[in-house]
C-alpha cells in the first residue's frame, strides 16, 4: 500500500490516488458510480479534488477495494487538508511585513535560524510564542508572572519569557524536586547567602539552582535578547515557583539582586495559581509599585543588615575603599553593595562599576 503521494514536493488530492487505484483495476467511473450508489457527477468531483473525501465515501471504497481500508483514505484526506491549511498559512504570512516583524520579535537572535526563509522563521516564532497570530503575542505569557524590567519592548520581553519557559525542564531537576515548601525555602536562605559570596557567577548559579530545587523552586538563566530590558521574572511551572534571570548588565551583583528580588516576591505571598498578567513597564525611572518596593527591600535585607546599611548611606560619601570595607563587614561581594547603592539612587548607574565582578 503506497504512502501519501507527492508530486515535486506537493501532496496530491486523495481523489487522484483513488482514481489511479480504480484505473489499475480496470474500473470506469460509470461502473464505480453504479457499484457504490453515487452519481457520476458527485464521484467525478471527488476524484478531481473538488470535494473532500467523507467517511461515508471511504467506507464505500473499502467495499469496492477490500484490500484498502477506509482508514487509509481518511488518513490521507487529513494529511491533504493539513497540507492545504499550511499552504494557506504560508501564503498569509507572505502577505505580512515579515522583515519588520522579524525585527520586532528578534527572529535571528531568538531562533538561530539565520539564512532560512522568513516565512519558516515566522512559523517557528509563532510556535515558540504559542499563538496563531503575531498580534496575539501578549496572550503568550503564562498566567501569574511578575517581572523586573528597565523599560524595553513588550515583544522582546515576551519572547525572552518563552525562551526561559523552554529551558525549565532542561536546567532543573523537574523529576526529582519535591513540592514547594515556604518553610523549607526559608531554611536554606542562609546557605543561599553563602553561595552568593562566590563571585564566580556561574558556579554560584549552579549551587543556587541545586538549593532551590531541593525545596521545590526552579531557576532558569537565559540571556536577555535585544530590547528585552528584563532582569528577572517569577512565574510557576507545573505548580512550582520558577525564577527566570537574564544576567542583564553581566555582573554578579546585579544578577543576584534580581534573584533575591524575585525571592522577595515569592515570599511576599505570590499566588502560584493567579492569572491576568500586566505588561506595563516598571522602568526604574518611574515609581515602583508597593510589591516591587517590598521585593527590593527584601533583596537588600537578604544581604545586609538594614540598620547598618542605613548608617552607611547616611554619610552620603562613598569610595571604593569604604564600599569594600562595608561589604566585608556584611559578608557579601562588594559588587552587590554597588548594585544596591545604584538602585537606591545613592550613586549613579555609571559609578563604581569597576568594583563589580563581571561574567
Image (cartoon, rainbow, N blue to C red):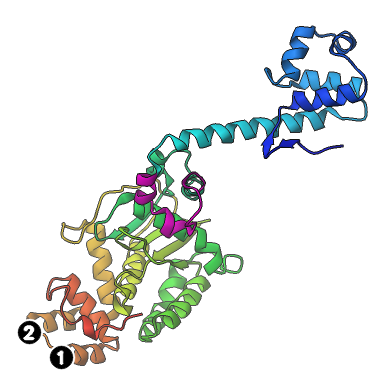
| 119 shown above or below 146 | above
What's drawn in magenta, residue-wise?
Answer: 99-120
Q: Secondary structure at mark 1?
A: helix
User: Does the magenta-highlighted stretch encompass residue 175?
Assistant: no
Crowding at mark 1 (Cα within 10 Å: few <14, some 14-19, many 20+): few
Q: Secondary structure at mark 2?
A: loop
Q: Quadrant of residue 231?
A: bottom left
- State yes or no: discs 1 and 2 in contact (Cβ < 8 Å): yes
**Residue 67: image x %, image y %?**
92, 30
**Residue 76: image x %, image y %?**
75, 32
The quarter of the image holding the N terminus is: top right
Query: Is 50 on the left or on the right of 348, as rendered?
Result: right
What residue lies at 52% left-to-right and 37% top-to-bottom?
90
What residue lies at 12% left-to-right and 83% top-to-bottom?
311
Main secondary-structure element of the magenta-colored stretch: helix
Residue wearing tag 2: 317
Instruction: For marks 1 and 2, give the CA distance.
Output: 9 Å
Residue wearing tag 1: 322
Amino acid at each position: 500500500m503506497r504512502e501519501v503521494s507527492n508530486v515535486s514536493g506537493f501532496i496530491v488530492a486523495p481523489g487522484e490516488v483513488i482514481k489511479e487505484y480504480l484505473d489499475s483495476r480496470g474500473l470506469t467511473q460509470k461502473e464505480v458510480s453504479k457499484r457504490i450508489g453515487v452519481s457520476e457527477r458527485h464521484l467525478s468531483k471527488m476524484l478531481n479534488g473538488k470535494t473532500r473525501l467523507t467517511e461515508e465515501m471511504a467506507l464505500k471504497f473499502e467495499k469496492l477495494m477490500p484490500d484498502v481500508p477506509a482508514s487509509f483514505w481518511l488518513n490521507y484526506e487529513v494529511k491533504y487538508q493539513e497540507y492545504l491549511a499550511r499552504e494557506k498559512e504560508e501564503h498569509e504570512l507572505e502577505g505580512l511585513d515579515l522583515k519588520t516583524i522579524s525585527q520586532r520579535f528578534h527572529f535571528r537572535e531568538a531562533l538561530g535560524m539565520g539564512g532560512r526563509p522568513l516565512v519558516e522563521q515566522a512559523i517557528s516564532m509563532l510556535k515558540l510564542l504559542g499563538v496563531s497570530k503575531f498580534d496575539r503575542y501578549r496572550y503568550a505569557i503564562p498566567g501569574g508572572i511578575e517581572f523586573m524590567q528597565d523599560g524595553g519592548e513588550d515583544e522582546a520581553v515576551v519572547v525572552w519569557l518563552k525562551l526561559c519557559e523552554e529551558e525549565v525542564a532542561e536546567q532543573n531537576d523537574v523529576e526529582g524536586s519535591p513540592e514547594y515548601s515556604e518553610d523549607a525555602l526559608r531554611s536554606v536562605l542562609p546557605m543561599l547567602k553563602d553561595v552568593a559570596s562566590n563571585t564566580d557567577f556561574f558556579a554560584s548559579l549552579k549551587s543556587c539552582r541545586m538549593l532551590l530545587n531541593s525545596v521545590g523552586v526552579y531557576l532558569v538563566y537565559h540571556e536577555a535578547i535585544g530590547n528585552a530590558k528584563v532582569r528577572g521574572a517569577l512565574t510557576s511551572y507545573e505548580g512550582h515557583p520558577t525564577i527566570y534571570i537574564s544576567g542583564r548588565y553581566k555582573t554578579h551583583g546585579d544578577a543576584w539582586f534580581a534573584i533575591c528580588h524575585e525571592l522577595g516576591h515569592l515570599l511576599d505571598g505570590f499566588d502560584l495559581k493567579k492569572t491576568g498578567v500586566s505588561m506595563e513597564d516598571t522602568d526604574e525611572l518611574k515609581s515602583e509599585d508597593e510589591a516591587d518596593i517590598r521585593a527590593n527591600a527584601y533583596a537588600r535585607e537578604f544581604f545586609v543588615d538594614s540598620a547598618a546599611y542605613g548608617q552607611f548611606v547616611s554619610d552620603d560619601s562613598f569610595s571604593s575603599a569604604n564600599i569594600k570595607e562595608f561589604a566585608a563587614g556584611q559578608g557579601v561581594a562588594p559588587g552587590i553593595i554597588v548594585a544596591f547603592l545604584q538602585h537606591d539612587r545613592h550613586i549613579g548607574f555609571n559609578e563604581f562599576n569597576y568594583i563589580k565582578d563581571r561574567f
